[in-house]
Image (spheres, grey):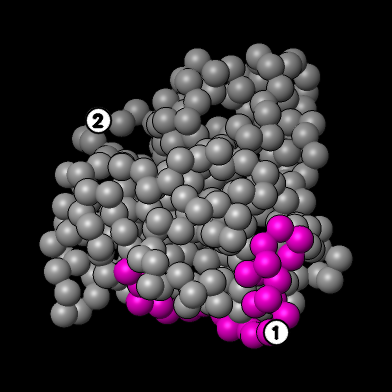
Amino acid sequence: MASPRYTELGAFLRSRRERIRPEDVGLVAGPRRRVPGLRRDEVAQLAGASVDYYNEIERGAGSQPSEQMLAALARALRLTSDERDYLHRLAGRPLPEPGGPLPHVDPGMMDLLTRLTSTPAQVITDLHVTLVQNPLALALLGDHSGFRGRNKSFIHRWFTDADARRLYPEADHDAQSRAFVADLRAAAARRDAKDPEARTLIADLNACSPEFAALWARHEVRVRRDDRKRINHPALGTVEVNCLSLFSEDGRQRLLWFTPALGTDSAGKLELLAVVGTQLTATPR
């Protein structure tokens, strides 16, 4: 990877990391810093890359970065959608399709997620694909990063995989099913009628889940905003929480955060999450 374009890619990444303060992304600045913004090793840490690999990218050397790595760098550096597209063009990679397999996390939501250190929080798409989770969300809900294909959508897993339903008590399943379908109908209407991701998800669920098909035929519409939920945790038992939502401007992404429900013992249980750690509630396939 040695060309003027890749040299520009390295310069662009360097300029983006120099504008970010460590505290903006949840890192401790420390008293002795010789560079403005983030260090290269900090960007590598945030993007899940090795320091040597990131150094090669910034030097304009090494192999062409993958689309997955570009998406990780865009999240780590809080790039806007325009900056993300520019990064992909410099790397010679196709631009991510809206709602495609590598959605770009809204920078404002990513910034808020970084600051939510004492409560479980995550960013999901309008089709309930988890984009990023903070450590407490991993501990409460399990790691959603390992799912592939249509199973990336929790709605798809809910109607096709019995393991997904272990997240909620059985008594709540019917209400959750109705809420998921009504929310999906609202999301599909916001998207273009020809949107392949939503259309394929709905067609697949209609074909493989009689429960989904029956609910879809009812034409109920309701955006999930603020919910009170009971969540099954493998170590803590049932945790009752308020699930609050903040939506992106186009409605395609939402930041979810979870607070203890009043009148329950959930406050103490949520405080134990950091001690319990990331015990998965589902096994990715």
- Residue position marked by numbered label 2 in the rendering: 32
Which quarter of the rendered picture does the N terminus lie within? Answer: top right
Q: Nearer the viewer, residue 55 or 131?
A: 131
Amino acid under label 1?
A: His
Asked if residue 214 lies in the magenta stretch, the reply is yes
Residue 204 rendering spot, x and y as whole percentages? 75, 58
Tell me how far mark 2 sits from mark 1, CA to CA. Answer: 60 Å
Q: Nearer the viewer, residue 94 or 143?
A: 143
Relative to 285, say whether 24 is above or below.
Answer: below
The reply to whether callout 2 and callout 1 are in contact (CB within 8 Å) is no
Asked if residue 284 lies in the magenta stretch, the reply is no
Which quarter of the rendered picture does the C terminus lie within? Answer: top right
The image quarter containing residue 279 is: top left
Residue 151 rendering spot, x and y as whole percentages? 61, 48
Identify the mark nearer the N-term, 2 or 1: 2
Q: Are there few (<14), some (14-19), or many (20+) residues within 10 Å of tag 1? A: few
The image quarter containing residue 80 is: bottom right
Q: Is residue 80 visible?
A: no
Dot 2 lies on which element?
Answer: loop
Q: Which residue sits at x=23%, y=57%?
A: 237
- Residue position marked by numbered label 1 in the rendering: 219
Amino acid under label 2?
A: Arg
For the record, the magenta segment spans 206-230
